[in-house]
Amino acid sequence: MAFPELLDRVGGLGRFQVLQIVALVTPILWVTSQNMLDNFSAAVPRHRCWVPLLDNSTAQASVSGDFGPNALLTISIPPGPGLQPHPCRRFRQPQWQLMEPNTTATNWSDADTEPCGDGWVYDHSTFASTIVTTWDLVCDSQALRPMAQSIYLAGILVGAVVCGYASDKFGRRRMLTWSYLQAAVSGTTAAFIPIFPLYCLFRFLVAFAVAGVMMNTASLLTEWTSAQARSLMMTLNTLGFSFGHVLTGSVAYGVRSWRMLQLAVSAPFFLYFVYSWWLPESARWLLTVGKLDQGLQELQRVAAINRKKAEGDTLTIEVLRSAMQEEASGDQTRARLGTLLHTPGLRLRTFISMLCWFAFGFTFYGLALNLQALGSNIFLLQVLIGVVDLPVKIGGLLLLDRLGRRLCQASSLVLPGLSILANILVPHEMGVLRSSLAVLGLGSLGAAFTCATILSNELFPTVLRMTAVGLGQVAARGGAILGPLVPLLSVYGPWLPLLVYGVVSVLSGLAALLLPETKNLPLPDTIQDIQKQSVKKVTHDTAGQSILRSTWL
C-alpha cells in the first residue's frame, strides 16, 4: 500500500488537518439545521375557523349585550378534541342558546356546522409564522405538511445516489463546492417563494445538496488523515451534527418567522462556497484516477502547510508513478456500481453497510417521532438531543480504538434495539423508566451514526468509496422515510411498532459482526487491495488453525 507512506511524508495529522476539520465541520452545523428545520418552520400552531363575530369589527359592533371573546367563541365554534375550540369546523349560525345557564355545546350535537370557508385564525404566541400558517396546511390540507418533509428526505436520497457517483468521477472537492453553492442558492430562494409547490421543489434541491456536503466532507477528512487518527477525525465530524442540534434550537428560538429562519440557515453556505476553493482535492483520489500532476501539487501544498516543505519537495512525478503503480492502471477508472454488487469481497460489505445505515435512519426517526409526542418545549427538546449526543459520541471515540469498528457498530445498534424491546414490557405508568430507556436508545444511535460513517469510508476502495457511501445514504434515507410510518401498525396492537423498531435494530447489529475489522488498517485504494486483505485474513486463520493442531498433536 503506497499512499499511506506518501501521506506520512507530507503529514497525516498536522496543522493542515486542524484547518481542514474546522473548515469542513463548520458547515455540518448548518446542514443539521436544514435537516431539522421542519420541526420549526412547519410547526402546527393552535388554530380555529375565522368567524365574523370574533374577527370582523363591524360584525362585533352589531352584537347587542356585553359578550366577551370567550362567549363569542362558544357560540361560534363547536368544541373539538380535548374540549378545545374545533380546529376545522364552525357553526353556520351563532348558537345564542349556548349562553343560557347550564347549557353546553355537547347538548347541541345536531347544531349545523360547516368547514372553515373563510380561512383560519392562528395562535402566534410561539411562532410568528410557519409554512402551515402561510399556506393553510391544516384540516383538509394537513397531508401536505408531511408531504413536504417526505420530499425533502427524497431529495437527500436522490442526492446521495447522484453525488456519490459524481464524486468518484469528478472529484470530492469539486462536488463539495457545487453542493455549497446549490444549498445557498436553493435555500435562499425557498425563503422567498410565494407558492407551496415551488417551496417543496427548492427544499428538494437543498436536500440534494445537503447529501453532497455530508458525503464529501466525510471522504475528504478520511482521505487526508492517517489511519491512526481517522476515528478522531470522523468523530469530530459527527460531533458537528450534535452541536448542530444545539445551534438549530437556539437559532429557531430567536427567529420565529419561517422565512427568516430559512434564510438564516441558508445564507452561511455562500461563505462556505467562497472558501471551499481553497480546500485541496483528495490527493488519494487524484493519484488513483491517474492525475499525477495535480496529485503532486496537492501533496506539496499540504506538506508546506504542515511545515514539511523539504519532504514535499522530494516528491516527483516519478516517485508518485512508482509508488502508485497499481492506481495508475487502466482498470481502476472503469470501476462502477456493478462492481460493488458483483465482486465477492465487496458484495457482503455493501449489503451489510446499507443494512446498518437503514437501521440507523429507521430507528432514529422512529424514536424522534415518539419524543415529539411527549409535548415538551420544542426548542429545549432540540437542544437536549444534541446535548445527549455529545458524551455518547465522545465515549464512542474511546471505544472505537479499543474494541474496534465492527464490535462498536454491532453494539451501538443492538443496545438501542434492546432498549426499545424492553419498553414493550414496561407499563405506561412507569414514565420515568420508559423515558430513560428511550434516551439510552437515542444516545446509542448517536454512536451508531459515528461507527457507520467511519466503516463506510474504511471498507471500500478509493475508486468506489463515494459510490458505496452514497448507497449507505440512500439506505439511511429510505429508513428515515419508512420509520415514521411504523406507528400506523399500532391499530393491530400498541406494542407492534416497538417490536418492529427493536427487531430491525438488533438484527442489523448482529449482521454487522460479519463485517471485517478495519481498525488501524490503511485505506484500500483498489479492488485488488480488498482481495489482498481477504487473502491475508484467510492465511492468518489457516496459520492459526495449523498452530492449534500442532499444539494438540
Image: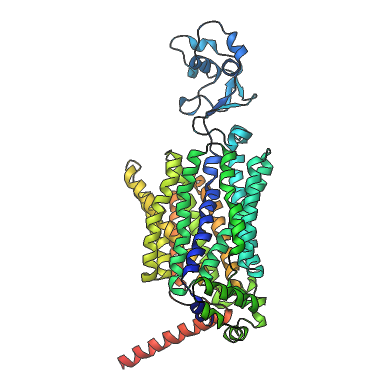
Q: Residue at x 36, y 66 (%)?
A: 398
Q: Position of residue 379 (x, y in %)?
A: 45, 41
Q: Disc count in the image?
A: 0
Asked if residue 159 shows in the view, the reply is yes
Where is residue 366? Give x, y as percent: 48, 50
- When the figure is inspected, residue 123 is found, relative to residue 553, above or below; the finding is above
Q: Is residue 492 visible?
A: no
Most extreme residue toward the left, as rendered? 552
Q: Nearer the viewer, residue 409 or 140?
A: 409
Q: Residue at x 65, y 78 (%)?
A: 293
Left or right: residue 261 compared with residue 420: right
- Closer to us: 264 or 245: 264
Residue 543 appears at what percent x and percent y? 40, 89
In this orientation, which residue lies closer to the viewer: 121 or 78? 121
Q: Residue at x 65, y 62 (%)?
A: 162
Q: Residue at image x 38%, y 86%?
A: 544
Query: Quadrant of residue 90 in the image?
Result: top right
Q: How is the image coloured?
A: rainbow
Of the 4 image quadrants, the one containing the C terminus is bottom left
- Residue 499, given in percent of the width and then of the height, sits at 43, 53
Eyeballing the image, is 531 above or below 271? Answer: below
Say if 487 sits above or below 507 in the image.
Answer: above
